[in-house]
Amino acid sequence: MAIRRCIQSIGLLLIMLSTWTSAMADELSLLANIVSSEHRSEINRERDRFRYPQQTLEFFQIQSNMAVVEIWPGKGWYTEILAPWLKQGEGQLIAAGFPLNAGPQWRQTMQAEYQQWLQASPEFYDQVTVVELGPPSFWQLGADESVDAVLTFRNVHNWLKGGYEADMFNAFYQVLKPGGILGVTDHRSDPDTDIELMKKFGYLGQDLVIELAKQAGFEFEASSEINANPRDNKHHPKGVWTLPPTLRLGEENKQHYLAIGESDRMTLRFRKPLSITSDWAVNN
């Protein structure tokens, strides 16, 4: 009798595993279809070979039924993928953009153009919720413990230069549910690079980013070399902006920098603890 129950339990577990595997395959297939979809601009699709969106989102363990915050989406490169994917999976995308009427003007222009772009294609973006995040005083992304994941792509160097990196990471921690995910990519400096050089040239120490997240209460879970670029020696006249897509030097040595490609980038996954440890509570 005991053997029969054991066999039945094993059979049930195999059925559950098969169902889960099938669901994950469907999830990844849906994401792959959206990444390759022609609704994405040709320029953005061309950059997939440097940004690896499918692999990056898989590494971050994002699923289409999640509530996800995209931080400072800029012109919407990742929104093009996240919004329709989460919409089909009955998840939610919250786009945390630059605060309105808080300068500088180029950010105001970019935010206005982003919202106009969303409105122009409701079939893909009508369910995107836009909120404000950043200086001088917009540090709440939503209700505490209300989202499953926060994602930021190539933004931390801006916060470090502006001096409000701790405010950002604290905001992420507050809005995430216990067990929620923080996914970070950014330009990666050589080890032991001086912090002032990081601010000037846009490349950040990976250990520094990990420490910033830990100070906010996050647990560092894993790193990936998905977005690494060994051709980037990180020593360029205009810092990271020398390389594509910015190409700040214009035609000067353009082919050389195109051959290097986009910057070497860290890809880091953090987790909000299921329960706050006593050490973190004491220190904060």
Image: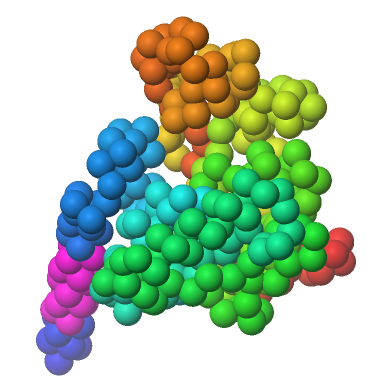
Residue in the picture at 72% in, 26% down: 200
Left or right, 38 with respect to 111, comes to left
Q: Nearer the viewer, residue 107 or 143?
A: 107
- Residue 217, visible in the rendered structure: no
Quarter of the image where the C terminus is located: bottom right
Residue in the picture at 70% in, 72% down: 140
Q: Which residues are magenta?
A: 11-28
Residue 104 place in picture, x, y as percent: 71, 49
Q: Up-down: is 256 above or below 217?
A: above
Quarter of the image where the N terminus is located: bottom left
Tell me, yes or no, whether the highlighted magenta stretch contains residue 185. no
Residue 246 place in picture, x, y as percent: 50, 29
Q: Nearer the viewer, residue 74 or 250?
A: 250
Q: Up-down: is 5 above or below 33?
A: below
Residue 81 place in picture, x, y as percent: 33, 57
Tell me, yes or no, whether the highlighted magenta stretch contains residue 20. yes
Left or right, 227 with respect to 155, comes to left
Residue in the picture at 57% in, 64% down: 96
Q: Nearer the viewer, residue 224 or 99?
A: 99
Residue 186 place in picture, x, y as percent: 55, 39
Left or right, 10 with respect to 245, comes to left
Residue in the picture at 81% in, 69% down: 281
Left or right, 111 with respect to 5, comes to right
